[in-house]
Image (cartoon, rainbow, N blue to C red):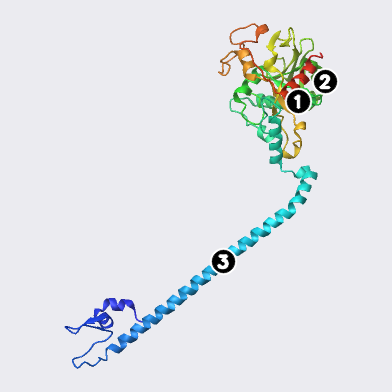
Amino acid sequence: MHNRNTYRNHPEDSLSTGLNKNNEGGTTVGSTRGAGGHTSCAAAPVLSSTRTRKHTNEKKRKRRGCFFALLSLVVLLFIVGRMTSTSITNSTTGSDFLSKEKQHKHDDGNINTALQLSQIAKKDLNKTTKPAAAICTKKALFRRIPSSVRRLHYRRVVSAQEILAYIIQKLDNVGAPVTLMFGTLLHEYRNGTGPCFQGNFHDKDLDIAVFAQHIPLVIALADDILKKFQWKLKVKNEKDKILVFTAKGQGAVGRGYQIDIYGLECNTPTKGLLYSPWQNARYAMNALLPFVKYKTIPYDNATHIPNSEQHLQFVHMPYNPKCFLQNLYGDDFMIPRKGRGNSDGVDPKYLYNRPKCGQLLSSAEQKELERQLAFCESV
């Protein structure tokens, strides 16, 4: 085979194999003629070289054709294989669906937890005006100690959250709600964006409320709380419906972190008001009742979460927390202020109708209101 570069480097050879022009005799292909008109012997190897190149090019075209045919076959086999695999997978999935569905119904431990919790949350959203967020777990509840907080105070705040969950669990056995109140409610309303209620590390207490009828039930838990959490019932005033728990060894009330539990009486002193005897304070009933499910208590992990929304246990909050907080702290209640109390010095007897709190209940909410009123009116 001739090297093509040879022809590029020697123009005289290329002339002998290409179109050669005589002085006046026209064009001849692949040969030269002498003066006598006979074919020159030099033309023979040139013709042979041309045929060799044509033969070589023909072989290359055949090889390329075979290569592309083989490539097409491989691609076709790959496509057929994928289609067959998909068909087998789909048929397997369809045949196994019923058996898997039966197993799903009989084995709660193997239920897809994420789907289960989503369904529960959606059902609970329809039951409460202030819908519950995602299920709270202890992993979601955990927070590292802030640099500005003493370790002892940090532990007490965390422990108080555990006690709150314990009280909610016990009172839930009789259907009694436990709601956030006062400064604790204010902080949660401003900052509570996660799935769990989280106490304020910079506060001095955890404020919650129950119906006055349930104060004795909380008192009955005092011994268990002392054994489980090392917190003592420091103040027990059944007349004024106030309980205070403090960490064991903490000392006097107000020195450290504590849990304040208020008992509320309905339609006292007049119809449409809730009354806190300890503070001699009156609140608009339609701002607080019915207490609504807010966030679940923390669960250990996904396997310990109940299978039904009926078994989930919640911390509650007032029906209309914004209006309630406006009545307590003024229209600027969202602005943090050190030592914030009643913003304009209003007598606690008149912490309502400033502004008035409207209320439009669904049938389910009306039913829940009647259920809760049955608790507090039986005191």
Q: Label for residue 168?
A: 1
Q: Give the residue drawn at x 30%, y 78%.
A: 6
Question: In x, y percent, where is residue 185?
Answer: 65, 20
Q: Which residue is mark 3?
A: 76
Separation of disc 1 and disc 3 at Cα? 66 Å
N-terminal-most mark, 3 or 2: 3
- Residue 237: name its quadrant: top right
Name the outermost residue toward the left.
24
Separation of disc 2 and disc 1 at Cα? 14 Å
Density class for disc 2 (Cα within 10 Å; few <14, some 14-19, many ≥20) is few
Let me know if residue 247 appears in the view.
Answer: no
312 lies above or below 67: above
In front: label 3 or label 2: 3
- Residue 270: name its quadrant: top right
Density class for disc 3 (Cα within 10 Å; few <14, some 14-19, many ≥20) is few
Kindly state the secondary structure of the residue where label 1 is placed.
helix
Q: Indicate the amino acid at tag 2.
A: Ala
Is 212 placed left or right of 35 in the picture? right
Separation of disc 3 and disc 2 at Cα? 78 Å
Kindly state the secondary structure of the residue where label 3 is placed.
helix
Instruction: Using the image as rendered, state which of residue 252 and residue 223 is in the foreground.
Output: 223
Instruction: Using the image as rendered, state which of residue 3 and residue 231 is in the foreground.
Output: 3
Density class for disc 1 (Cα within 10 Å; few <14, some 14-19, many ≥20) is many
Kindly state the secondary structure of the residue where label 2 is placed.
loop
Q: Which residue is mark 2?
A: 220
- Figure quadrant of the C terminus: top right
Q: Indicate the amino acid at tag 1.
A: Ile
Q: Indicate the amino acid at tag 3.
A: Leu
Question: In x, y percent, where is residue 114?
Answer: 69, 40
130 lies above or below 235: below
Q: How many marks?
A: 3
Q: Are marks 1 and 3 in contact (CB under 8 Å)?
A: no
